[in-house]
Image (tube, coloured by chain):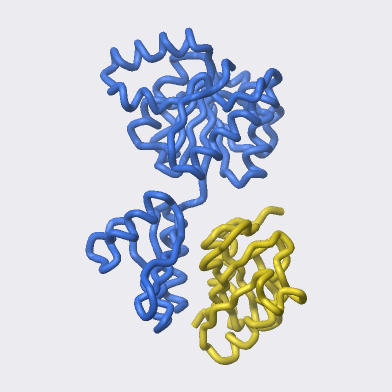
Chain colours: A blue, B yellow
């Protein structure tokens, strides 16, 4: 790999843009294809598919054999709510490779004493989100139980196409949330992407157990590229 | 500490800029159960220092050895490891899987 190509690849990663490195195995020729340049590439079809699945793969046969290395930005997790579950979720999510940030406007919750070196932004989501920059490679986990705090973030996450959007709350709480989001003009398809009740069903009871259920659901969404609707009442 | 794909690619660039001979190994293909997915990377320098992984530690030693040749020659090569291979008794995958690894020099 030429150093210029490697540097360009690292720049794309730093800017959180997806791209594909195409290596023609017979000749060793390589090119970097940005997500906005795919249509112009001879392998456009395969590259689109690999990007959608976020999966690197070999394509073609013999002399035309090529490797598509899909380079997607490292996953982030944005947690709304500096709550007890978040205290357990933060170290777990970091171990699993997520770059985690917490937003909570309630300054009594958002303290360094409770979260150590985890970045905690003590602002309303409407204020904090533009600078944070939600993107499709971010999981949005809403845990405050407070519609004033959770819902602006949920709406933003759905509109940007976060790979995972989940919200804490019982089925009844979620039904009321759905009504409010419908009234706000969100389509049923978008609203249907919310994982609620949040977390896969492992019978989680304690905050740490719920954190495991949430992290597992986020990882499943990341790895399968498929939205799942089932969950636990948390 | 966990090492991410970004760390590996950043190290490859940094090491090369420092003037070191650098090779990048990438998992091209896996068959059966393999510990690291296609696209996983390992960066190796001419001294044999490395970061990242292409297996669960089973074949990294062999890849690092091959990388020294690739750094010297500049010619990329594809390596295959698996239990079906004669060499597997020396550097095989205990999980029973098979992997192909592309090793190239960073120029």
Residue A221 picture location, percent across and down? 49, 38
| Marker count (numbered) | 0
The residue drawn where x is 46% and y is 26% is: A229
Give the side of residue A61 with respect to residue A88, left or right. left
Residue A15 picture location, percent across and down? 42, 54
Give the side of residue A66 with respect to residue A112, left or right. left
The residue drawn where x is 23% and y is 60% is: A39
**Which of the pair B74/A26 is nearer the observer?**
A26
**Which of the pair A12/A205 is nearer the observer?**
A205
**Which of the pair B10/A40 is nearer the observer?**
A40
Residue A105 picture location, percent across and down? 52, 22
Locate residue A158: give its quadrant.
top left
Locate residue A233: give its quadrant.
top right
Residue A178 picture location, percent across and down? 38, 14
Q: Which residue of the protein is positioned furthest toward the left in this rendering?
A: A40
Whether residue A220 is situated above or below residue A202 in the rendered picture: below
Locate residue A187: give its quadrant.
top left
Whether residue A100 is situated above or below residue A54 in the rendered picture: above
Whether residue A162 is situated above or below residue B66 in the rendered picture: above
The residue drawn where x is 40% and y is 28% is: A193
Whether residue A25 is situated above or below residue A192 in the rendered picture: below
Screen quadrant of the C terminus of chain A: top right
Q: Which residue of the protein is positioned furthest toward the front in this rendering?
A: B84
Q: Which residue of the protein is positioned furthest toward the right in this rendering?
A: B90
Q: Which residue of the protein is positioned furthest toward the bottom in this rendering?
A: B73
């Amino acid at each position: 790999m030429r150093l210029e190509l490697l540097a360009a690849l690292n720049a794309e990663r730093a800017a959180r843009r997806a791209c594909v490195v195409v290596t023609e195995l017979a000749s060793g020729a390589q090119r970097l294809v940005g997500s906005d340049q795919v249509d112009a590439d001879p392998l456009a079809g395969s590259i689109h598919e690999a990007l959608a699945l976020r999966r690197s793969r070999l394509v073609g046969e013999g002399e035309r054999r090529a490797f598509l290395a899909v380079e997607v930005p490292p996953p982030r997790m944005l947690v709304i709510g500096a709550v007890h579950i978040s205290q357990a979720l933060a170290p777990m999510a970091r171990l699993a490779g997520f770059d985690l940030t917490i937003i909570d406007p309630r300054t009594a919750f958002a303290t360094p004493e409770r979260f150590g070196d985890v970045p905690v932004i003590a602002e309303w989501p409407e204020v904090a989100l533009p600078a944070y920059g939600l993107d499709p490679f971010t999981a949005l986990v809403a845990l405050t139980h407070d519609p004033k705090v959770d819902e602006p973030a949920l709406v933003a996450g759905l509109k940007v196409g976060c790979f995972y959007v989940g919200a804490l709350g019982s089925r009844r709480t979620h039904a009321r949330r759905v009504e409010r989001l419908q009234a706000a003009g969100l389509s049923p398809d978008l609203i249907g992407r919310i994982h609620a009740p949040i977390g896969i069903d492992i019978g989680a009871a304690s905050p740490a157990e719920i954190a495991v259920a949430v992290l597992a659901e986020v990882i499943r969404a990341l790895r399968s590229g498929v939205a799942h609707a089932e969950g636990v009442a948390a | 500490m966990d090492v991410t794909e970004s760390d590996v690619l950043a190290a490859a660039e940094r090491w090369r800029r420092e003037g070191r001979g650098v090779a990048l190994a990438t998992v091209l293909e896996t068959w059966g159960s393999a510990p690291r997915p296609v696209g996983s990377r390992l960066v190796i320098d001419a001294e044999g220092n490395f970061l990242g992984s292409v297996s669960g530690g089973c074949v990294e030693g062999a890849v690092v050895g091959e990388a020294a040749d690739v750094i010297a020659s500049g010619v990329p090569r594809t390596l295959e490891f698996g239990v079906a291979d004669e060499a597997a008794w020396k550097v095989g995958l205990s999980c029973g899987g098979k992997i192909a690894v592309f090793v190239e020099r960073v120029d």
